[in-house]
Image (spheres, rainbow, N blue to C red):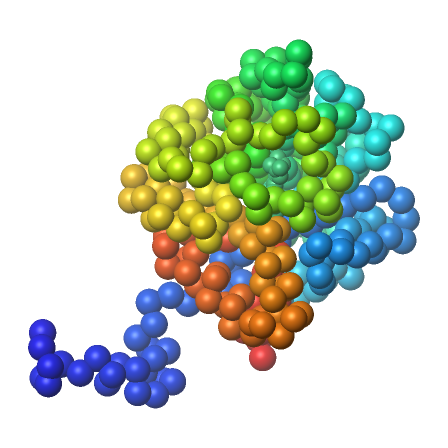
């Protein structure tokens, strides 16, 4: 191929040609909407570090569910904020069958039966230490945590969750959860594994939203090291063998290479999580007039999909779909 016979600009000349030649198209099917829930009634709370994002109490959720469905979005991922007096080191509230998470799953499946409900599995919002697992002598202990996570997943499945989404990064959790679900007959409850979840500085706003900042240390003994990519593939192959249905890479934008490599090495669907900090940095820059919100937002979600993600958990989901409809 050479100039002047080949002129690349021919395929860029008009919007119609560009649309026809585009390799990636974004639709509502590409998204999972994260939802933050809190106890109480009539609550719609601002999250200061996530402009435009809110925490809802269950009774105020209907309008939000309608809006999500009106935009043809199909899937939500639920997180709950737990009051301090319900936090401990054992995840007691995490396995409570009438806890806020379990009630929320039941409520949403009743209100909006067609909406796919995915639920976060990890102890951090429930932990006095803000860690994803059980703590013994300042260590996050792997195997005792598996038991709690399995019970937690089971309680979400019983409440009606379509997919459980373990975000804890303990070793062996996918197999343990799959076993626990199958033993009780929940053979159709899926597992979306946070397979390559990196110890990231971009989770800050989320931890503010859920009041789940680690009380001591950091999460580097269980979340992955930014410097590594081979390890992500090792995690992916192990999760696949243990029975994961969907593999996730998180955060998204700083890890596009991981998404792309994982896409090449497995046949499972790949999800990417465009995390809170990725959202907030665009919002902050846009509020200052330094970036155009819509074009930066679209560019990031397109890049994530182009890298190989089949779908994206994103705080921008509603905004993107609103923009696509206009
Ligand atoms: C908890 C969890 C975290 C996120 C999703 N599940 C935070 C963490 O690991 O500290 C982060 C999501 C975001 O930043 O949007 N296990």
Residue shown at 58%/30% (left/top)?
A: 219
Q: Is residue 11 left or right of residue 75?
A: left
Residue shown at 56%/55% (left/top)?
A: 278
The relative height of residue 250 versus residue 279 in the rendered view (above or below) is: above
Q: Quadrant where the N terminus lies?
A: bottom left
Q: Nearer the viewer, residue 63 or 293?
A: 293
Quadrant position of ligand 1: top right
**Residue 121 location (% of width, % of height):** 62, 32
In the displayed image of the protein, which residue is found farthest to the bottom? 14
Total labels drawn: 0
Q: Is residue 233 left or right of residue 38?
A: left
**Residue 213 location (% of width, % of height):** 70, 36
Do we see residue 233 in this rendering?
no
Q: Is residue 257 left or right of residue 199?
A: left
Do we see residue 175 in this rendering?
yes
The relative height of residue 10 versus residue 310 in the rendered view (above or below) is: below
Residue shown at 25%/83% (left/top)?
A: 9
**Residue 280 location (% of width, % of height):** 63, 57
In the displayed image of the protein, which residue is found farthest to the right? 41
Residue shown at 35%/42% (left/top)?
A: 262
The quarter of the picture where residue 320 lies is: bottom right
Q: Nearer the viewer, residue 159 or 147?
A: 147
Q: Nearer the viewer, residue 168 or 247?
A: 168
**Residue 231 location (% of width, % of height):** 37, 31
Q: Quadrant where the C terminus lies?
A: bottom right
């Amino acid at each position: 191929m050479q100039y002047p016979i080949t002129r690349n600009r021919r395929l860029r000349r008009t919007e119609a040609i560009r649309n026809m030649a585009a390799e990636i198209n974004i639709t509502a099917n590409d998204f999972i909407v994260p939802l933050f829930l809190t106890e109480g009634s009539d609550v719609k709370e601002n999250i200061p570090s996530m402009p435009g994002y809110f925490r809802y109490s269950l009774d105020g959720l209907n309008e939000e569910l309608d809006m999500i469905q009106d935009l043809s979005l199909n899937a939500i991922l639920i997180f709950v904020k737990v009051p301090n007096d319900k936090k401990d080191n054992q995840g007691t509230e995490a396995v409570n069958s009438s806890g806020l998470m379990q009630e929320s799953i039941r409520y949403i499946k009743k209100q909006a039966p067609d909406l796919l409900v995915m639920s976060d599995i990890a102890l951090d919002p429930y932990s006095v230490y803000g860690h994803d697992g059980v703590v013994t002598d300042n260590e996050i202990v792997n195997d005792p945590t598996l038991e709690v996570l399995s019970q937690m997943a089971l309680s979400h499945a019983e409440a009606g969750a379509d997919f459980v989404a373990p975000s804890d990064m303990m070793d062996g959790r996918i197999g343990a959860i799959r076993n626990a679900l199958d033993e009780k007959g929940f053979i159709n409850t899926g597992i979306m594994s946070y397979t390559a979840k990196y110890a990231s500085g971009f989770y800050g706003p989320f931890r503010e939203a859920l009041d789940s900042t680690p009380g001591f240390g950091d999460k580097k003994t269980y979340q992955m090291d930014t410097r590594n990519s081979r390890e992500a593939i090792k995690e992916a192959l192990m999760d696949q063998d243990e029975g994961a249905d969907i593999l996730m890479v998180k955060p998204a934008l700083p890890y596009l290479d991981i998404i792309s490599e994982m896409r090449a090495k497995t046949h499972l669907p790949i999800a990417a999580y465009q995390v809170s900090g990725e959202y907030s940095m665009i919002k902050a820059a846009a509020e200052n007039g330094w970036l155009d919100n819509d074009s930066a937002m679209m560019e990031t979600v397109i890049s994530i999909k182009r890298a190989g993600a089949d779908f994206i958990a994103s705080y921008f989901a509603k905004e993107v779909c609103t923009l696509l409809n206009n």
